Amino acid sequence: MAEPLEGFMVVEMAVAVQGPAAALYLRDMGAEVIKVEPPLGDASRYSRGVGNDTPDGIIGPQYITVNRGKRSVCIDINTPDGILAIHRLLEKADVFLTNFREPALVEMGLGYDDIKSRYPQLVYASVNGFGPIGPDADKAMLDGAAAARGGLINHTGYPDRAPSLPGAVVIDTSGAMHLALGVMTALLSRERFGVAQRVQTSALGTTLWLQQWEITHVNMTGAELTRAGNHHGNISGPYGVYSTKDGGAILFALAMDLEAWDSLCIFAEAFDLSIDPRFQTPGQRLGEGLTEEDSVEVRQRLTSIFESKTTKEWQEFLYTQPEIIWERVRNWSEVLDDEQNIANNYVTSVEVAGLGATRTVGNLVTLSETAGSTKGNAPELGEANSEILGSLGFSSNECLAIETHATKVREEYITALLEAVAAVSKDPG
């Protein structure tokens, strides 16, 4: 059976997460994705992160995560052959996807105004930090900067401590989902109406999308929500994370019916809570009609209740209660081994040169008739140069010259870097 985007070609000129992860979704859905990398490669190839003791030269986890299944073409776009290769790719492409900043794209002759008349059937997809217009349209961005600007950091953490970063790059990855959705919408529109167009999303816009309920609540009520630690700033009552006797943690969300609430109270020997008139309906157990003092009181009770039993004891009981919404708090190693993730193929395995099989997140969208699939390993830098450039009309000698130039640029950079490090070592002052 064909995959949804089989026959579509995406030219990706993007780095880090937000752009490449969008193209990854398109690849999983069947599109051919050609990743255009500069002579030094996408910088995330070499980003090792914390506690990474894999051998030198192993591709970084961030690159592997969002570039599996793609083909890599390594060219210097600042050369005549490089820009020619880009345009020959765009002649055949359905989508040009980038997270380069607008001034850089315009300088390279790859701004939207330069491209739209030349390739009228090309969907031009771009994502940036703070939106396509406005005073900070060209401002540099990393995930945390958008989370700060959009209010997420201010509302994460404890009220008596400094605001906290979220525990993952949720803005970059959510921004990628928005960009992929925009591309799919534009491709559908092109199929229906025969018109290609520009798709633009941003990390800041995504941050707001993730908080739309809370932001709307603040505007409607005038009540500024505050950080609530292990609870949610806009949900009163029991909802929250509670520590167990042996150092684990349980997210307790809701007892959906009174029988489930009674069972919890009986198991915890908190019989008074079972008959407390403040917690007799699902709405009440999610904070309806509760005062701030009520919330503090019930959370303190549940803190003591959960600390009275081990994680195993709580799990064994809670698994007997289908009308209680809860989960054990897991770390990422446990997430990889979670039978639910494995059953749904949310975790997949790729081969990493020099390391072997490595698990990562797989394709998360299933379709009953034209399902996508994970597509293999992250590419080595420039592994597809000869094949793809040759298919674009470059001779073998021209392909060799492009590759030789890229290699020379890399070697010159490495030499200059080593000389700079040596100079600092000799004269650290």
Image (cartoon, helix red, strand yellow):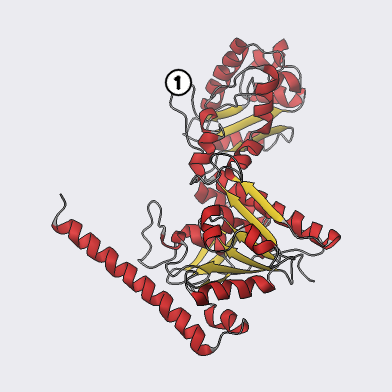
* Residue 76 visible, this angle: yes
- Hey, which quadrant is residue 155 in on the image? top right
- As drawn, is 236 to the left or to the right of 77? right
Name which residue lies at 38% across and 68% down.
57
Give the residue at mark 1: 160
Q: Is residue 92 above or below residue 98?
A: below
Task: Return the x and y of residue 161 as percentages of the image width and height.
Answer: 43, 24
Q: Quadrant of the N terminus?
A: bottom right
Depth check, front residue: 144 or 312 = 144
For residue 261, above or below residue 400: above
Q: Position of residue 236 (x, y in %)?
A: 64, 20
Callout 1 amino acid: Asp
Query: Residue 278, located in which quarter of the rendered image?
Result: top right
Picture quadrant of residue 125: bottom right
Residue drawn 39% across and 51% down? 50
The structure residue drawn at horizontal position 51% and vertical position 74%, both measured from the top left corner, is 82
Q: Determine whether the residue tagged by mark 1 lies in a helix, strand or loop.
A: loop
Q: Residue at x 76, y 54 (%)?
A: 185
Label tally: 1
Q: Is residue 159 above or below residue 200?
A: above
Query: Residue 244's spot in the image, x, y percent?
Result: 51, 31
Measured from the top left, where is residue 271 in percent x and y? 66, 15
Name the residue furthest right: 192
Evaluate whether residue 365 shows in this view: no
How busy is the neighbourhood of tag 1: few (under 14 within 10 Å), some, or many (20 plus)? few
Q: Who is closer to the viewer here, 349 or 169? A: 169
